[in-house]
Image (spheres, rainbow, N blue to C red):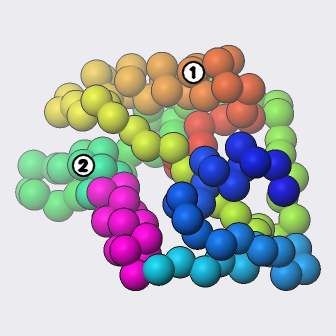
Amino acid sequence: MHPWFSSSLFPRGSQVTWGGDSPQLSWNETQARGLSEKLLDLFVGISQLILKGRSGASTVVSHKEWGLRFLTCRAQLTRPVACVIMDQLTEIECQEQNVCSWKLRGLQSRSVYNTGWCDVAYM
């Protein structure tokens, strides 16, 4: 396993060994609590991206509505995947659909052209 992979994905001090194709982790309670708090922050952040309708009910805006650019790049994954790596979205809060759509198109452009990904990794 590459050192950068271990240090960026798993908390410092966790024991990572490989059993077959997947990592076997040994975390203490503090590390597990920290991960839980980070996941909660992620879910709260995602929930803030959902557009609220006039009735107060949440509305999910489709790819077509925000102007997704369809790309030809495909990344074939062998299922089940051993690890999922997510990135955190910050400062993308918006209230109007045209502003939110503009921000999502910018996010897609950065994901594809700056990081080399096939598409937005946050969908």
Left or right? Give the position of 74 relative to 51.
right
Identify which amino acid the numbered label 1 is placed on.
Arg
Residue type of the residue flagged with mark 2: Gln
Specify whether residue 36 is in view: no
Question: In screen coordinates, is 84 left or right of 55?
Answer: right
Q: Nearer the viewer, residue 26 or 92?
A: 26
Seen at 30% across and 57% down, the residue is: 41
The percent coordinates of residue 2 (x first, y second) are: 81, 49
Residue drawn at 72 percent across, 33 percent down: 117
CA gap between label 2 and label 1 equals 21 Å
101 and 35: which is toward the camera: 35
Q: Which mark is residue 110?
A: 1
Indicate the position of residue 112 as horizontal and vertical percent values: 67, 25
| Residue 116 x, y percent position in the rendering | 74, 26
Determine the secondary structure under disc 1.
helix
Front-lying residue, 76 or 58: 76
Left or right: residue 106 versus residue 54 is right
Sequence-wise, the earlier of marks 2 and 1 is: 2
Q: Main secondary structure of the magenta part?
A: helix
- Is residue 71 shown left or right of residue 14? right
Other-residue count near label 1 (Cα within 10 Å), few / some / many at <14 / 14–19 / ≥20: some
Q: Residues within 10 Å of mark 2 (few under 14, many from 20)?
A: few
Q: In the structure shown, which secondary structural element does the residue marked by tag 2 occupy?
A: helix
Q: Which residues are magenta?
A: 29-43
Which disc, if any, is residue 48? 2
Q: Which mark is residue 16?
A: none
Quarter where residue 6 is shown: bottom right
Residue 111 shows in this picture: yes
